[in-house]
Every structure is written in structure tokens, then in C-alpha cells.
Image (cartoon, rainbow, N blue to C red):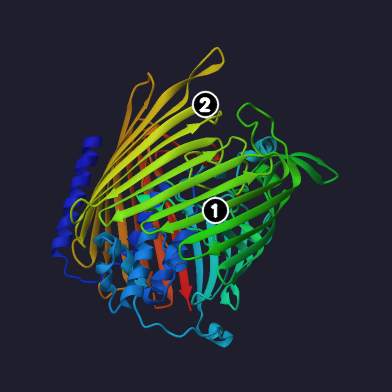
Amino acid sequence: MAFRQLITYLFVLFLCLLCGVYSLFGQEESIAKQTIEDLIEEIASSTDAELDYSSLYESLNYFLNNPINLNNTSVEELERLQFLSDFQIKSVLDYIQTNGAMLSIYELQLVYGFTMQDIINLLPFVTVASVETTKKVKWDNALKYGTHQVFMRGQTVLEQQEGFAPISDSLLAIKPNSRYLGGAYKLYAKYKYNYKDKIYWGITAENDAGEEFFKGSNKNGFDFYSFHLQLNDISIFKTITIGDFQPKFGQGLILWSDMGISKTPYIMNIRKKAQGISKYASTNENYFMRGAGTTVKLMDFNISAFYSNKKIDANIQDSTDNEIASVSAFQESGLHSVPSEIEDENSIREQIIGANISYNHKFIKAGITGINYNYSASLIKDTSVINQFDFRGNENTNLSLDFLVTLGKINLFGEEAYSINGGKAFLNGVLVNPAPQIAFSVLHRYYERNFQANYGNAFTEGSKNSNESGIYFGLEVHPIKKWAIRAYFDSYKFPWLKTGADAPSQGYEWFAQAEFVPTRNLDLYFRIKNEIKSVNQETIAGIDKMGEQQKLALRFHINYRLNEQLVLKNRIETAKYKESQQNTEYGYMIYQDIFYTLKGIPLSFNLRYAIFDTDSYDTRIYAYESDILYAFSIPAYYSKGTRTYFNLKYSVSNYIDIWVKYAQTYYSDLDVISSGLSQINGNTKSEIKVQLRIKL
């Protein structure tokens, strides 16, 4: 079966090459979308968690339509691009300060520290223009020239899942959680408005598959609603945010209510670039705050303060007279599709008060952050050996000090944090760029086992900022023109027990990637990643014996633009998994991507054909998929089979866009897919998404 799949793959590749040679059309394919997707894929590759990338995508997508004027920009604005290093940002600003305003965007080739690939990635998001005199916001202009967008999306799995299958009333009465209460469609609606980078406001609504819609627990329609209003640069107010927002300060030890970048090929981007308080317009129902926040700029100081008050999901443990006294756990799935989930929905109230004072100078930045969160019911867990240092009670307070010191081609950064129970956490690093051909980074972290920060999201190997110490080394070398080598080594320890390791454990991970970019139309890389760590093995006399686990992955990837319309991507990736005395397991995945834009017709499409063969879920391979705008898919390829998908985007007019995505996974060795209420009796899983956007 695998041999036939390989032959099919090679035949598809041959047809793609033939199509490229004889294509008669010509229209520039945007590199920007690929840059955004590559960044998201690298972030996703460092974690198995299902993260919401909407904030990152929306921020970068904004600059596609509103490019940054390099002649009139700032460190804060360039940091929002995420993929630029501190030294590249400083280098651009120094070049302009020394040589005057850029006359052409292609002057970037003269800027210290930029490779051809860096420039290619940056071009879609920036421009050069004369510097206009800053004018006050005129509200009449805001209403007249602002941009309105409306999104409506629906998606569903075409095969019947167990949770939607018919069931008798008598059985449902005995097992009320054995079926979903709502329909099989996931629904999404969004309205967003912005006037330049001054005014943003919008409403987001989402209903997951299985959740009731305009009935039952959701009589008002969608299960989740979010609203935001943000005003920028009004008098001394740098930002005013009302509604849903996300604060990000320091290096994320105590306050980073969004996804964070840890170990990726961007070894000079290990320093988090805090953006303070900003609007929240995503659909994750947990990692945001609801209330108001503002940042005031006074000379070299930024003073931020915020207040949040919202209900959250929790497992009810004890209640009297309709008042909840205690809960056993906070729920973060955001799903409310069966009675037990609805019972936990919005069961307790969370109140948060926080502030930050930061000093910003050319060579030094320093900040102090404090946050207090209070819950309307106490969190009381059943104490075990592993979780005895976890947060309990109904209140917690965190304080931290962060800094960034720039000394020529050396950046020192860090954050030191404290939780009210006495737990401490420290993160410190250095970035060095001694020459255009070489750069390296070092990061050390030490998080005590009793450090508690409910909204922390710092650089870490584990899932939270506690019970971990480690040191990371990163290196980037450009040995000859058009070549780049990136590598990192990370060694870590867990001083106390953790899930999957019933004893103090340790591990290390190393990564190396060689990149070759001979022309703007061709780039490729080879990657190897290896991780070895201690985990539980067999159980002897009720005690888990520790053993060693190894995960090794090899990848070859190539992008090539055959003409102005046709772009192809190929990837071959293998995986190896080994646990102590158990048999070694292997897996591989191969895919072909085709991106095509028609000339004379406002239609573009892309498709993928992939084959995969893995010995188990432990050798699964993740691969980012192109999707409809603001939707994300990073499936795990495991078992044996094929996966195919295609995206279509058609612009009905300058004001209306339509996206359609169809994806199907076929498993040649399975008769049942997934388990529980998501179980499908069969060997195929198909999904369709449709989205409409109206722009005014």
C-alpha cells in the first residue's frame, strides 16, 4: 500500500512540474501569506497544545493592507511583526538615522544584518514614503474613512460522529452526557472596524459543534461572545481598551494572556516582545480579560493599569443555597455541548486587577508588574504528591521586575518574579550579534516548584512556569552567501514530580537546520531535531520505574515558484520514537502543495496531497495547513493513509470574498477513528468550511 501511495505522489509531482512549464498565465503570488503561515507553523511545532493564532495572524494581516512606513516607525511597531530580531529592528532605525529617509524599499539590501530571505519576508509588510506631519484624529474622518469587515463561517465533519448518532430517550435519561445537545455545525461570525491604527472595535461570536444554538443554554444564539474597543495615541493615552483585552508584560513569567514563542528556528527571537494592553478578538474562551485597561505615556515612562471581571468555567465541588463554595478545577476547553459541561459553564467569577510601570530609554528598559486575581469560590484540589504545590484557595498575587539593556551588539534581558505564597521564578538571557555572519543567544530559567502564576506563559519546556530549570543555547551562522545554519541546544530539569514522571526528571533537546536560498523563487532547508527525556516506564510493585524516551525527527522542505502564478511546496519528514527496552517505532509523511492564482479571474486555490505511515501515535507528525482566513488547522498525521485538502478563494467583487475548504483523511488500517463522542465508525474523516467576508 505504501509503495502505491509513493508512486501516486511522484505522479502528482510530475503533473505539477508539467503544469508549471506550460503555464501561460502571469500574476504575482503574494509571499506574505506564506511568511505568516511559516511563522505560525514554527510556533506550533514547539507544543502539542491547541493554540489560538488569530491575534498573531490578524496583527500581521493588518500590515499587509497598511504597510509600515520605515521612514516613520518605531521599535514598538516593528516588534509587532514578530519575525524581526532586536538587532534587525535596531539596524533599520540606525540606518535611517545615519543616512536619512530611505528612497527605495530595496535599500534594505544595504542594512546590516538582513539576508535575502529576511528581506523577502519583510517586503510585503513595509513601505517607504515621506514622513507626514502627525495630525489629530478627526472623528468625522474616522466614521467616513474607517474600514468595516463582516465574516460569517460554517464548518462541519461530514461523517456521523458518535455524539450526533440517534439514541433512545430511555438510554439518554440514564446517560445524559452520551450525546451532544446541539447540531453538528461549528459557526463563527465577526464584525471588525478600524480607522488606520487609531481606532479598533468589533464583535466576535462562536458556537462549537455540539453546542445549542438559539435554544437550551444558548437562548441568545451563540455560545461565546466577545466585544472590544481600542483607541490609540489620544493625547497622553497610548492605549485605551474597553471590553475584552489581553495584557502582555515582561517575559511572561506572571502575565502573558496569549500564546508565547519558545523554541523555534528563530533563535534570536527568544526574547518576548511585550506589547502591553491590546484588544482581544479571538475565540479562545479562557485566555483573555474582560473589563478595561489603559496605558499613559509620561516622558520616558509608560504607566498601565487594567481591571477584569468575568465568569469562568469550573468543576463545582460544594454549593449551598445556590451559592458555590468551592470548585475542584478550572475548565479550559471552552466546550459546552453536554449537560455536565453546561453545569460547569460560567460557574464562578474571576476578578483581576493589575498594573505595570515601565521606563523606556534608548539603551535601557525596565518595568515593574503586579497582578492580583480573586475568585468567588475557593479552588480545593485533592492533594497528591505531584500537585501539592499547585495553586489553591481563592486569591493570588504576583509581582515581577523585567529589564532589557542594549550594549552595542549585546542585548541583556530578563524577568524576576514572585508569587504571594513565596514561590519565585527567574528568567535571564543574552543576545549577541558580533558580525552579520554570526549571532548567538543564551537563556537561563529557574522556576521553583511552588511558583504560582495563573496567567504566566514564559519560555518553558513544560506546560507551566513552575518546577523547571534549564539553559538554552542558540546559534545562527551565514557561512557563505545564500546559506544559513541555525541550531539550538536546550537542557532542562524538573526538580519535582510532574505528569508522566513520578520522580525528579531531566532531558535535553537539540535542533539544527541548514537553509539555502539561491533565488527569490527557490528556497529549501533540511532539519533535524532530537529530544531525550526521562518518563515513567513499567510499574513494579505499584511504583513507576523511570526510563528514557527519545524522539527524533528529520525534515526536508522545498518551496519553488515556477512562474508568477504557480508555487509548489514539497516536504518529506520522518520520525523515530524509542522508550527504553521497547521496540523502536518509525513514521514518515510526504506531501505536495500547489498554490495557483488565475489571471483575469479573481480566483486562487491551493491543494495538498499527503501520504503518511507511522507505527503509532507516538510517531505522529504535525504539518500546518493553509486554511481560510483566520481559521487554522495543524493536524497530526498518524497511522497509515492519505490526507487531501483544497482551498478556494473567489472575490465576487472588491467588497465580497468567498472561501471554501474541503479536507479528507483516509486511514487504510483503521475501522474506527477517534473515540468517545467524537468517534467515527469508518476509515475516513471529511470536513468542509465555508466563509464569507464583506468589506465596506
Callout in the foreground (2, 1) = 1
Identify which residue is drawn at 24% across, 62% down.
116
Say which amino acid is labelled 1. Asp
Element on which disc 2 rests? loop
Q: Horizontal and vertical percent for residue 636?
A: 40, 42
Seen as rendered, the residue at the extreme front is 407
Q: Is residue 578 left or right of residue 27?
A: right
Q: Is residue 631 left or right of residue 562?
A: right
Placement of the N terminus among the 4 image quadrants: top left
Q: Nearer the viewer, residue 570 or 528?
A: 528
Q: Quadrant of residue 21?
A: bottom left
Say which amino acid is labelled 2. Pro
Would you place residue 473 above or below residue 89 in this image?
Answer: above
Q: Horizontal and vertical percent for residue 210?
A: 58, 49
Would you place residue 36 above or below residue 13 in this image?
Answer: below
Q: Is residue 10 left or right of residue 399?
A: left
Q: Which residue is mark 2?
A: 504
Q: Nearer the viewer, residue 298 or 34?
A: 298
Q: Which residue is mark 1?
A: 402
Seen as rendered, the residue at the extreme top is 541
